[in-house]
Amino acid sequence: MTGKAVAIAHGAATIINAIALGKGAAFGVDLWTRSEVQLTDEPSVIRAEIVSDPKESTLLIEKTAARVLRHFGLEKRFGVKIKTLSNIPIARGLKSSSAAANATALATTAALGKTLGDLEIIKLGVEAAFDAKVTVTGAFDDACASFFGGIAITDNSKREIIKQLHLPKDLTVLFHVPPQKSYTINSNVDRLRTLKPLVEIAFEQALEGKVWEALTLNGLIYSSASKLNTTIAIDALAAGAVAAGLCGKGPAVTAVVPIDKVDLVEAALQRYEGEVLRVQLNCEKAKVL
């Protein structure tokens, strides 16, 4: 059995969390997940390992590979071994699930010697996220930003891209990453959906191209509803960030920062417990290596 492939997909950060509205927006960052897939002659047997975080559940990447095999009607012919490696902190809101699903769907398709359209790859990963119960909305916005890079504004319920925008080149991203983890599936969805009228305002801002204002407003809305600390984002804004707010369901906070303000904003974030990551914006598509 020689079918083997490696693929990489990048991370992303929230502009609009889709839980309240069913529509969302996200942008690419240059964190990454690499997935190595090897076909085996054990039909339907899928073994997976997260090399960078061995204690985390491998269910999502297993379900992703299974979805790809089923898509091509090959689940009774092949099994799969998967290894992923990532520098994206898991369960902090930084789209580790979307990157892992995209990279694994791409690598499994390539290992089979098949090709699929970009959106077909993304949608297989989204379905796998539902199968693995790691998502509330399908995270189609996060998956598109992870796969394509740039900014993706989407209708998650319809799995449609509404608008894609380019990212400016003169900004850096800082993430404040607290030590505690938070899994999307544990979110209080009914409570968050009461925010729909407010999130609608932020979403309209994003559609108008005011993506950084939208990110900040979205972050304040969801942080307040989730009883998370809003002062981290406000301190980042006071230190010079153009946008700051909760990433996904948190607990990480994103700050989008002009290059000349990075040190000031980083110092503000370092006053809080946790790690500060400095990353670049990403415009590169996911790809087979």
Image (cartoon, rainbow, N blue to C red):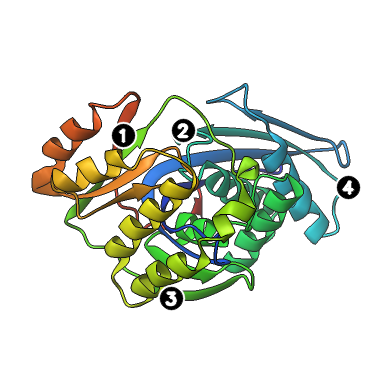
Residue at the image point whose x is 61% and y is 22% from the top: 54
Q: Secondary structure at mark 3?
A: strand
Q: Nearer the viewer, residue 106 or 3?
A: 106
Give the mark nearer the N terminus: 4 vs 1. 4
User: Residue 11: where, in percent of width, then height?
Assistant: 44, 47
Do residues under tags 2 and 1 come within 8 Å of each other at their CB atoms?
yes
Residue on which disc 4 sits: 77
Residue on which disc 2 sits: 89
Q: Residues within 10 Å of mark 3 (few under 14, many from 20)?
A: some
Q: Is residue 283 left or right of residue 192?
A: left
Residue at the image point whose x is 30% and y is 52% from the top: 281
Q: CA distance from mark 2 to mark 1?
A: 10 Å
Q: Is residue 42 left or right of residue 266?
A: right
User: Residue 282: where, in percent of width, then height?
Assistant: 34, 53
Residue on which disc 1 sits: 277
Residue at the image point whose x is 68% and y is 48% from the top: 108
User: Residue 264: where, in percent of width, then height?
Assistant: 12, 37
Disc on res. 60? none
Do residues under tags 4 and 1 come within 8 Å of each other at their CB atoms?
no
Disc on res. 163? 3
Q: CA distance from mark 3 to mark 1?
A: 28 Å
Q: Amino acid at mark 2?
A: Pro
Residue 2 quadrant: top right
Give the mark nearer the N terminus: 3 vs 4. 4
Q: CA distance from mark 2 to mark 4?
A: 35 Å
Q: Secondary structure at mark 2?
A: loop
Placement of the N terminus among the 4 image quadrants: top right
Residue 116 shows in this picture: no
Q: Amino acid at mark 3?
A: Lys
